Structures are given as C-alpha cells and as structure tokens.
Amino acid sequence: MTATAKPHVFDATADRFQEEVLQKSLQVPVLIDFWAEWCQPCKTLGPILEKLAADYNGAFELAKVDVEAEQQLGAAFQIRSIPTVFLVKGGQLVDGFAEALPESAVREFLKHHGIEPAEAAPVEEAVAEPAAADPHDEVVRLRHEVAEQPDKAELKLDLALALLATGAAQESEQLLDALPANLATDDRSLRARARLGFLAVSKDAPPVQTLEAAIAAQPEDLQARYLLGARLLAGGHDQAALEQFIELLRRDRAYQDGLPRKALIDAFKVVEDQDLVGQYRRKMASLLF
C-alpha cells in the first residue's frame, strides 16, 4: 500500500508533516489516511482513496500515514482504530471518518466539502437517475424478469430492493443472501443489509411512545435509546434517529462493544440525505476524535 509513483499520493512522515500536509493544505485540501499493513479494512479503503486521488487529478492530495512506522503522528491525532481518515483544509482539520467507506460514500464526503474532480466527471455520473417507480409495481415487473432470466443476478438484487421497499423483509433478505460476491458488496446491497438490521431490531421493540417515556424517566437507559433510534429510522424519521444514536455515543461509546458507533455507521448507509449524513458524521468525529 505504499504511495510510491501514484499520482497525488504521498507517504507522510512526522518530520515533514508541517510542510507536506499543513502548509500544502493552504493551497489544496489534503486527505490523511491512517493505515497499517495488518489492517484488512485498510486494504479495501486504501486503493479506493488512491484511485480517487488520481481521478480527481489534483483536486486533493492524499497523505498516507503508516501508524506502525509513524507512531508519533498516530499519537498526535489520537488514532484509536484504523482505517481513520481526516480532511485538512486551510491548515485546519475540518472533518473525518473512521471506517472503510465504499467509493460512492467517499465521493459524497469530498463533494460535501466542495471537492470536485479537476476534470469532467465520467459520463455515467452525469446521467440522471430514472424516476422512482411504485415498489409494488416494480416487484411484479421484476418477478417476471427474474423468471425469464433466472441467471441474471442483477435482477435479483433489484427485486430484493423492491421487496424491501414494500416491507417484505424476509424474502428480500433471502435474495440478498443468495447474491454472488460481487453484488453482495455492492453499495445497494450494503444499504439494504443495514436497513434490514434496523428493521429486525425494531420489529419486537416497544412502541415509540413507550421508549420515549422510558428515556424521559431514565436518560441513562441506553437500550431504550438504541431501540428508539432503530424504530425512528425504520419509520423514516432519519434525523430524529441519528440524534438518538449520537446521544448514545456521547453517553457511552463502549456500550455493547461499540454499538453506538456501529449504529451510526449503519444509519449513514440507510439515510439518503447526504447533507444530513455529513452533519452527523462531523458530530460523530468530534466525539470520537
């Protein structure tokens, strides 16, 4: 994962950090990627970041920090887990995330901070998405197409998503389980998995009003707060759900082996409003780092 000979990517070191990162960020944003050779998620995220650094053609620079070789930098940034990524602009740390995001989410992160490719975006990115169809009609249509083309796995993913939109979670999950590896890691599959997780949690949870009353009576009832967040997210109340998960993180980040952070990360996959996601990513980063 060395940065050697890759465009707009360099290995950052403690002795040249001021010049190569902080001063450089006065002219161009710098993304700092904290990684290690033994870190499996880093091996997923690292190539994505390096590809985007090349694709964006100088719109940002990517500084790679091997936490094993540069322990001083890791300590200075209080790195607790990897991969961890920070964005530095104008000499200041402005945002970050601590997970192996898919490429589309990293692009949204950059876009949120006004970082666009220096060259024209690929044609496929400029194509407007088709208008959303009624999910029940889509289920009927896709069932016919899957029956006619049973070997076409992409249609089964489309059907799983349409079924999930109608509330048919069990059949949707069965289809997702049967997808080949390349589609199982597709952004849409990951988003569907996250939504299924919240649906499963909220299925047997008490009603929203009961959970709200429990929290009002005992603000430290973290399980009630988590269940309320899951209920709200499953019901489409995205910001209210994120607020519960942020409060959960604020009160006890270690609760149930890091459940607050995991809940937020999964929620970010589900919520479609990227401005809202960016807002709560920053809140999460401020609490974690």
Image (cartoon, rainbow, N blue to C red):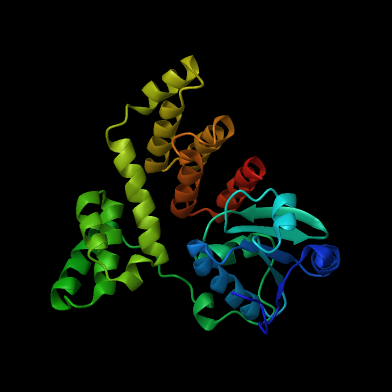
Q: Nearer the viewer, residue 52 or 148?
A: 52
Question: Which residue of the protein is positioned furthest toward the left in this rendering?
Answer: 147
Image quarter where the C terminus lies is top right
Picture quarter containing residue 180?
bottom left
Q: Residue 68's x, y, as percent?
A: 64, 61
Q: Residue at x 79, y 62 (%)?
A: 14
Q: Residue at x 32, y 27 (%)?
A: 206
Q: Residue at x 19, y 63 (%)?
A: 140
Q: Residue at x 49, y 68 (%)?
A: 44
Residue 37 drawn above or below residue 271: below
Q: Nearer the viewer, residue 160 or 21?
A: 21
Residue 150 drawn above or below residue 243: below
Residue 185 drawn above or below residue 244: below
Left or right of 196: which side holds 2? right
Image quarter where the N terminus lies is bottom right
Q: Residue 151's x, y, as percent?
A: 19, 78
Q: Nearer the viewer, residue 231 or 37?
A: 37
Left or right of 114: which side holds 255? left
Q: Residue 47's x, y, as percent?
A: 55, 74
Picture quarter containing residue 156?
bottom left
Left or right of 178: which side holds 21? right
* Residue 103 shows up from this direction: no
Question: Which residue of the protein is positioned furthest toward the bottom in this rendering?
Answer: 5
Q: Nearer the viewer, residue 97 or 128?
A: 97
* Residue 182 shows up from this direction: yes
Question: In the rendered picture of this protein, how many numbered marks are placed on residues?
Answer: 0
Left or right of 176: which side holds 264? right
